[in-house]
Image (cartoon, coloured by chain):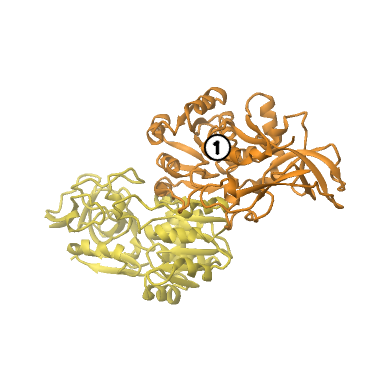
Chain colours: A orange, B yellow
Amino acid sequence: MNKQLLFIKRPQGEANASTWSLETNPIPEISDGEILIKQHYVSLDPAMRGWMNDARSYIAPMEIGSVMRAGSVGEVVASKNPKFEVGQYVAGTGGVQQYAVTDGKGFYPVDPKLAPLPTYIGSLGMPGMTAFFGIQEVGKIKEGDIVVVSGAAGAVGSIVGQIAKIKGCHVVGIAGGAKKCKYVVDELGFDACIDYKNEDVKERLKVECPKGLDVYFDNVGGEILDAALGRLRLHARIVICGAISQYNNKEAVKGPSNYLSLLVNRASMTGIVVFDWADRYKEGAEQLGKWMAQGKIKSREDIYEGIENFPETYNRLFSGEKMGKLVLKVIE
Amino acid sequence: MNKQLLFIKRPQGEANASTWSLETNPIPEISDGEILIKQHYVSLDPAMRGWMNDARSYIAPMEIGSVMRAGSVGEVVASKNPKFEVGQYVAGTGGVQQYAVTDGKGFYPVDPKLAPLPTYIGSLGMPGMTAFFGIQEVGKIKEGDIVVVSGAAGAVGSIVGQIAKIKGCHVVGIAGGAKKCKYVVDELGFDACIDYKNEDVKERLKVECPKGLDVYFDNVGGEILDAALGRLRLHARIVICGAISQYNNKEAVKGPSNYLSLLVNRASMTGIVVFDWADRYKEGAEQLGKWMAQGKIKSREDIYEGIENFPETYNRLFSGEKMGKLVLKVIE
């Protein structure tokens, strides 16, 4: 049987138990051109909240009644598609379910001997690619830049900061809580980390970036984005990757009041969506894999178990009760 | 004697009569290296409101008791500086006064035979340069782009839209009132103009830009910026040139709630300050002059008279009771 989590109700504000329904259905037969994937892990990402809205975005809204959209990694257990073999491991967007049937579009092979499976939906998957292309191609970091990253202990932010360190930047993270900040500095090697839950971000940024900042990689939006805007240097670049502080708003998003700092400093604010870089994922994964093998980039997944625990695990994205990439093991 | 307008009190909210004081002082003697300029016209610009704030910006705040900062054009009537000759006309930042003493820094010669003097502080001066480099170098317009410009009847916006037309773009203006909109379409040749005082900008933008917009040149901020953000196409560019709707705020600036459209559309929002392009002003002025001579760009100045009328003339910037570049004749 196949346990599947269906998206049954668009949330207003936070998603909750009534957003989804866990159903058990027979494992489907596959048709010509299709494969059946036994899924091991699914990825939990803040972007999921956006997919639930019935609004024009970079991807179609999820339809009511569909399997909850999610990145996943698993094993091909049946194949009527010549591009895939039984026994092969693949990653893609398989959704929150134990078995996925697909024509293979968007799935690509991964090697469990080179890295643990969860890493392929984390640092070697979309979050890693987002960080890799976001900080380098959109943020355009160069040696000596002062780089600030919010969500610094998270799946994307942790990689962003480590890449910036490799590239010779001074890197300041922003994260929630002393434990995460300690991890960001001691384990990931950032130069400093500001605890937004217990510190005045604006004041601490003045201390950590007395000359201002060249690049701000934003995963959170809200007041922290405003604080960063207040510290821009001439020609600074802000990369807009996410706005987790705003995703559960019932009212309008809080726009950045300090946006005129872009004018004053001839600075820019640019959005990134990782899919734009799909034709360069191979390059990104190879470089990240090399850095990980060299010990220059640390990857951490926070793994929970049981498809039935998806809703409470999902809530950790917004409560912050997780460390690194949030992953759910759905295989039994 | 020299009538001078001194900046005597930083305003909270709108500037008013108590912001300035008109004084009459002897015309000063000049020292070695200096010149004396008999000023004919001074420029009135929305940016003036920002210069009055005691805040870090792209230029130092005006000091209390100093002559009100303003662009100006006039005649050299005395010179102890070998770079300038008596009888020569020059433009620069002479301030709101009838006679200016300067070492000549930032002043450059202009030719009253080629264009009327007020044009040198308008379309051939800072507003023209802002438009020229802003829409081309920051907005990166290309043929076929859909371009939206706010403040379309103003000193900068009117030139922005005309350049975009020359470059083969579809150009939609936004201006206040039917008279300005008619001028923008009939005289300046924009494809359409939205009257923000009498129309729903968001709805009308849907009609005028059914496929969205590629470039938005913003002079106003506030709700109009949000409306434009809601219409971005993939990889759209927003040029942040000003935010006249926000300059007189007593509370915080209203940040653009729709800024996440930058993410969804992988778009960018970038500030421009004209001074960055100083080493290319000559190129800009020559090209604009050529287009004006060819009748491809129309320049319009709205000229008032009398230095004592500066405060009420200044208010026209914000009330919108003017058409084109606002200029005050200060010579008697």
Circle 1 crowding by C-alpha within 10 Å: few under 14, some 14–19, many from 20:
many
Residue farthest along the top direction in this orientation = A186
Q: Is residue B144 above or below residue B14?
A: below
Query: Is residue B330 in view from this perspective?
Result: no
Number of marks in the rendered image = 1
Q: Is residue B110 left or right of residue B26?
A: right
Task: Residue type at mark 1: give it.
Answer: Ile
Residue appearing at x 19%, y 54% in the figure: B19
Q: Where residue A325 sits in the image (x, y, percent)?
A: 61, 34
The chain holding disc 1 is A
Give me the residue at 47% from left, 71% from top.
Answer: B296
Task: Name the residue that disc number 1 marks.
Answer: A141
Tag 1's secondary structure?
Answer: loop
From the top left corner, tell me how far across and down residue B305 is, in percent: 22, 68
At horizontal 72% and vertical 30% (from top left) the residue drawn is A116
Q: Quadrant of the C terminus of chain A?
A: top right
Q: Is residue A254 visible?
A: yes
Res B90 quadrant in image: bottom left
The quadrant of the rendering that contains the N terminus of chain A is top right
Q: Along the horizontal axis of the image, is B142 left or right of B327?
A: right
Quadrant in which residue B232 is drawn: bottom right
Task: Please state the horizontal and vertical placement of residue A169, each as a whole percent of the image.
Answer: 53, 31
Residue situated in front as seen by the camera: A158 or B59: A158
Residue A43, position in %: x, y? 66, 39
